[in-house]
Image: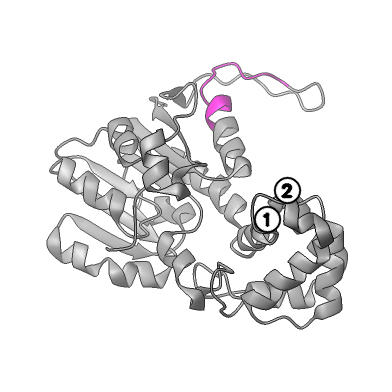
Amino acid sequence: MNGHTPVMLGEVLQTLSPKDGEHYVDGTFGGGGYTRAILEAADCKVLGIDRDPDAIARGQKLVEHFAGRLTLVHGEFSRLDEFLGGAKTDGVVLDLGVSSFQFDEPARGFSFQANGPLDMRMSKSGMSAADFINTAEERALSDVIARLGDERNARRIARAIVAKRPIADTATLAQVVKDAQGPAAARLQIHPATRTFQALRIHVNDELGELERGLDAATASLAPDGRLVVVSFHSLEDRIVKRFLSERSSAAPKASRHAPEAPRDHAAYRLITPRALVPGDFEIRANPRARSAKLRAGLRLAA
């Protein structure tokens, strides 16, 4: 499990509060950091889910170590209710975004730090980033880069990508994006291609759609007093989680004048974190990738 540092591990454990005899779901198994800590904190069981087959393969050592207490499943966490087979769980933890293993492996194509194929697929199947940028219309490219990357130069970047196609590797794409931004690229505090790569990764893996479906699946699967704990790294992800928990923690949600909503008889959650928890300075210094993390959690109420 070397190379993987679970973010906000202490806060996750404190919020999830594992107990003997209970059952938990780690919907983003990754390097197994959360799963190991949960299993060490209590005599419980964990269902670990990951759509990356490499993560499932790496995790077999943990399965052997925690004999009979850990089950790993290859698939999307949005299917966790299916994987549970109708059973209820006492807690669901989700660590969103790309894992350290994926980011640090050039062959996966998530990063421009080292050249590799322009892939970015967490599941190693379906449409790759190269497939998308080499076939999409300029407007579609621009929309994705602007919406998912919050990139102000999205139109210029999309135009440059179309002009340079086909693009097959991360280094070429990073250079195209940098060149498209001109002299302004030198004034940026981050690499000029960071936002574009982020947008493409989120799009290729449908990360926001997966999150929305996963939150619904978790809600359907949590037992009363079960806990939903989500760590996000992107403002769009955090906004989805914040809105989801807020809307389902009030018995009488605010109605829109455009689409009035009838008050719910029962709230689904009580907020554990009225405000998002964030990592401390010590953790950020030790693990800079934690700097944008936010943790939100809710306690499942009886239906």
- Residue 182: percent from left, percent from top: 83, 62
The image quadrant of residue 225 is top left
Residue 148, relative to residue 132: is it above or below? above
Q: Is residue 180 shown above or below 39? A: below
What percent of the width, then of the height, locates residue 13? 28, 37
Res. 7 image quadrant: top left
Identify which residue is drawn at 49% across, 20% down: 266
Based on the picture, tell me whether residue 248 belongs to the magenta stretch: yes
Tell me the kind of residue under disc 2.
Asp
Q: Picture coordinates of residue 50 (x, y %)?
A: 40, 61
**Secondary-structure class at tag 2:** loop
* Front-lying residue, 251 or 215: 215
The part of the chain drawn in magenta is: 245-255
Crowd rating for badge 2 (residues with CA inside 10 Å; few <14, some 14–19, many 20+): some
Disc 1 to disc 2, how far (Cα)? Answer: 7 Å
In the rendered image, which residue does mark 1 sit on? 195
- Residue at position x 45%, y 38% in the image: 219
Residue under numbered circle 2: 150
91 up-or-down from 5: above or below = above
Q: Is residue 103 left or right of residue 36?
A: right
Quadrant in which the C terminus is drawn: top left
Classify 10 Å Cα crowding around label 1: few (below 14), some (14-19), many (20 and above). many
Q: Earlier in the sequence, mark 1 or mark 2?
A: 2
The residue depicted at 23 percent of the width and 44 percent of the height is 38
Report the disc number at residue 113. none
Q: Is residue 225 visible?
A: yes
Q: Nearer the viewer, residue 185 or 218?
A: 185
